[in-house]
Image (spheres, rainbow, N blue to C red):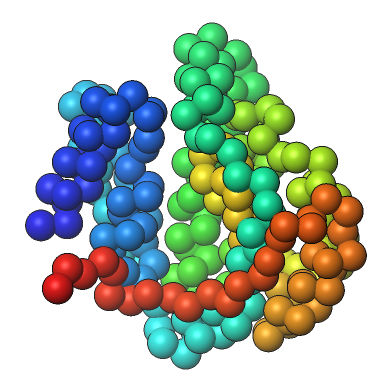
Amino acid sequence: DEVSLIHAVQNVEQMLTTGGGWQDQVGALIGGAKITRSAARLPLHVVPERLPLEEGFAKELASRLVLVFTGRPRLAKHLLQNVIRQWFSRMPEICETVRGLVANAEDAAKALTNRDLSRLGTCMSTYWRQKKVMAPGSEPTSVAALRERLEPGILGFSLAGAGGGGFAMVLTREPEAHGWVREVVEGCPGMESAYVSRVCIDFEGMTVS
């Protein structure tokens, strides 16, 4: 079943010392919108919750989501090691940010449930600011410049992956703004290898045939 697979992948990643979490397998295995929680104890037990996502709102959301490969892939393992060291140091800023990450995830879930795109965009941008606190240096200069240039026409921005990933997720103010995003990307120094893709929300999740 899905939950067993989520935990099995988690165990394999730990054995491989890649330091991964459980967000990737949850996202792949369970379709649609979801929020996942785990209590602060061992052994880790992951509890995914599917969120209601009406087809009409899903189409509207997909029309405003733009995926940008920034040309700047990063290895999550190395950045995660720094994050873990900071967490063990129990610096007040880090502890406060971790609490903020939890609260922001709940806010994002509420925004999706309430079909509030503006609030969802705010949560995306808040998440990215929080990730930069947890992993200083995770935003390359060219990505920061791209974010600033996109700012007037977007509701939210974040990079995917623990290490900032190679992909930026953008929530635009207007639907079908892919052409505008592409123009901004093409005019941004350091984005020569970047490209823009459309987003389609998968309601089914991963299947094996």
Check the image and report above or below for 88 versus 197.
above
The answer to whether 71 is drawn above or below residue 7 in the figure is below
In the rendered picture of this protein, how many numbered marks are placed on residues? 0
In the image, what residue occupies the spot 83% across and 67% down? 186
Drawn side of residue 27 relative to residue 12, left or right: right
Residues 38 and 80: in front is 80
Q: Quadrant of residue 97?
A: top right
Up-down relation of residue 176 to residue 98 (above or below): below
Which corner quadrant holds the N terminus?
bottom left
User: With 118 as the anchor, is 26 left or right in this view?
Assistant: left
Taking the view exactly as shown, the residue that stands out farthest to the bottom is 56
From this viewpoint, is residue 78 visible?
Answer: yes
Q: Position of residue 126 (x, y in %)?
A: 66, 48
In the image, what residue occupies the spot 31% across and 51% down? 25
Task: Measuring from the top left, give residue 30's x and y in whole percent.
Answer: 28, 63
Displayed quadrant of residue 8 = top left
In this view, 103 is above or below 75? below
Would residue 143 be found to the left or right of residue 93 on screen? right
> Which corner quadrant of the image does residue 173 belong to?
bottom right
Q: Position of residue 150 (x, y in %)?
A: 82, 64
User: What residue occupies the far front of the structure in this picture?
Assistant: 193
From the viewer's perspective, tell me whether residue 66 is left or right of residue 199: right
Image location of residue 114, percent across then percent down: 50, 73
- Residue depicted at 76% across the width and 68% down the height: 154
